[in-house]
Every structure is written in structure tokens, then in C-alpha cells.
Image (tube, rainbow, N blue to C red):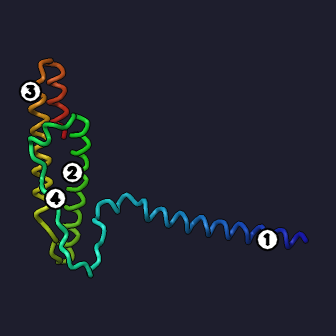
């Protein structure tokens, strides 16, 4: 009886650890932060070319709040990092980077965000707040 209890506990613990390690492996693949540097793979069977958006225009950005512009800046920064990583990876494998026109669109949008934030900092009547806004904009 003692042997069956020990043997049963060992089997239960092993099964539990296998289930846990399989679950942890599945979630680590799904939540791996490095996956954000690569675009999701598309099927080769897709005949339709993927159409990407345009860059943000300055008048559109002027309508957004400071927080929205800050969030958009980091979304664009993440997109730029993903595109640059993908371009470098494909270049190292001697493959062509698809849709290279996306990088300038992201860069233009980022420059326009910086321009709008600088305009707001210049227009700020409080000199201390204006200086702080300029520092924050220059840190981007």
C-alpha cells in the first residue's frame, strides 16, 4: 500500500508538471515580447496584395490631445522597430523586403507628431510649462 501511494503521487506530480510545462510553453510563445518585432506571417495563397495606410497629416494630428499623440508616437515607434527588424532579418537572408514604402510613412508621421507637439509648446503662454513641453518633445 505504501508503494502504491508513493508511486501514485509520483505519477500525479509528473503528469501535473507536464501539463504545467506544456501550458507555460504555449503561453510563452503567445506572449513572447520578441514576437512583436516581427509581422504576422501571411499565407502564400493570398492573391490579394495587402494595402497599408497612409501617413498621418499634421492637421489631423492637431485635433488630437497630448496623451493621444504620445500613445500614437509609441505605436509608431513600435511599428518602425518591427519594420526595421524585419528589413534587417530579410536583408541578412538575401531576401527582398516587401512594401519598403511603409518605413517612410511611419517616419513622416513621427516627424509630424513632433512638429505638432513643438507648435503646442511654442504657443503655450506659461514659460515654465512651455520649457517642460519642449524638453519632453525633444526627448522623443
Residue marked by disc 4 = 53
Locate residue 21, reporting x and y percent.
Answer: 57, 66
Reading the chain from its start, which is encountered first: label 2 or label 4?
Answer: 4
- Left or right: 17 as drawn, with respect to 95: right
Reading the chain from its start, which is encountered first: label 4 or label 1?
Answer: 1
Q: How far apart, in angstroms, are the residues tagged by discs 3 and 2?
A: 24 Å
Locate residue 49, reporting x and y percent.
Answer: 18, 73
Could you tell me if the residues under marks 1 and 3 are in contact, i.e. CB atoms within 8 Å?
no
Say which residue appears at 50% left-offset and 66% top-offset: 25
Locate residue 116, reporting x and y percent.
Answer: 11, 37
Q: Quadrant of the N terminus?
A: bottom right
**Is 36 located above or below residue 90 in the figure?**
above
Residue marked by disc 1 = 8
Residue marked by disc 2 = 76
Point out which mark residue 122 bears. Answer: 3
Assign a secondary structure to mark 2.
helix
Assign a secondary structure to mark 1.
helix
Which residue is more in the foreground, 2 or 76? 76
Amino acid at each position: 500500500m505504501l508503494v502504491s501511494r508513493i508511486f501514485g503521487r509520483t505519477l500525479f506530480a509528473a503528469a501535473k508538471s507536464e501539463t504545467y510545462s506544456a501550458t507555460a510553453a504555449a503561453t510563452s510563445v503567445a506572449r513572447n515580447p520578441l514576437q512583436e518585432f516581427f509581422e504576422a506571417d501571411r499565407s502564400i495563397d493570398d492573391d490579394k496584395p495587402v494595402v497599408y495606410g497612409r501617413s498621418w497629416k499634421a492637421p489631423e494630428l492637431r485635433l488630437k490631445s497630448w496623451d493621444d499623440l504620445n500613445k500614437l508616437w509609441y505605436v509608431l515607434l513600435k511599428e518602425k522597430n518591427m519594420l526595421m527588424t524585419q528589413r534587417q532579418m530579410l536583408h541578412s537572408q538575401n531576401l527582398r523586403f516587401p512594401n519598403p514604402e511603409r518605413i517612410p510613412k511611419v517616419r513622416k508621421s513621427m516627424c509630424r507628431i513632433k512638429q505638432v507637439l513643438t507648435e503646442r509648446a511654442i504657443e503655450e503662454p506659461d514659460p515654465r510649462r512651455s520649457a517642460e513641453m519642449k524638453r519632453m518633445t525633444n526627448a522623443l
